[in-house]
Amino acid sequence: MQAVDLFASVLLVAGAVFFFAGTLGLLRFPDVYTRLHAIAKADNLGLGMIVFGLALRADNVWIALKLLLVWLLMLVASAIVGTLIARRARERGVQPWARERR
């Protein structure tokens, strides 16, 4: 196995771990705002690692550029959708979670 293939495999596995972490945050965090933060950050980073891992294994530059374009569009879409969901939650009166003080 070549060094590039090994590095690409490490990026793919690390990206999958970040996707898993984002899913855990989505399931475990207490309110919409912390869930949005967890899923947006972890999934964007995970997708970036997967895209770079796949780009290293791509047959030509055009395929790698298409993968990068997909990632950039995902970054923009994630930011827009996250903002819209948070704004709607705020408009409906959803309060951010606060730990009860004793």
Image (spheres, rainbow, N blue to C red):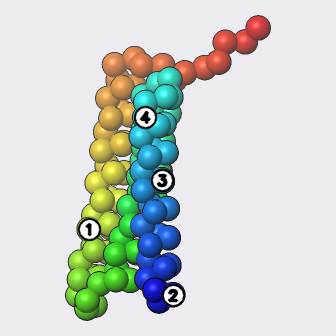
Mark 3 or mark 2, whichever is nearer to me: 2
Residue 88, located in which quarter of the rendered image? top left
With respect to residue 41, does 34 lie above or below? above
Asked if residue 49 shows in the view, the reply is no
Picture disc at residue 57: none
Looking at the image, do the residues carrying marks 4 and 1 touch, with CB atoms under 8 Å apart? no
Q: Secondary structure at mark 4?
A: helix
Picture disc at residue 70: 1
Q: Secondary structure at mark 3?
A: helix
Question: In the rendered view, does 100 fall on the left or right side of 47?
Answer: right
**Which residue is disc 4 drawn over?**
26
Type of amino acid under label 2: Ala
Q: Position of residue 38 (x, y in %)?
A: 48, 42
Looking at the image, do the residues carrying marks 3 and 4 touch, with CB atoms under 8 Å apart? no
Mark 4 or mark 1, whichever is nearer to me: 4
Mark found first going from the N terminus, 3 or 2: 2
Q: Secondary structure at mark 2?
A: helix
Q: Position of residue 41 (x, y in %)?
A: 47, 51
Report, in whole angstroms, how far the alpha carbon at label 3 lies from the one at label 4.
12 Å
Report, in whole angstroms, how far the alpha carbon at label 3 lies from the one at label 2.
23 Å
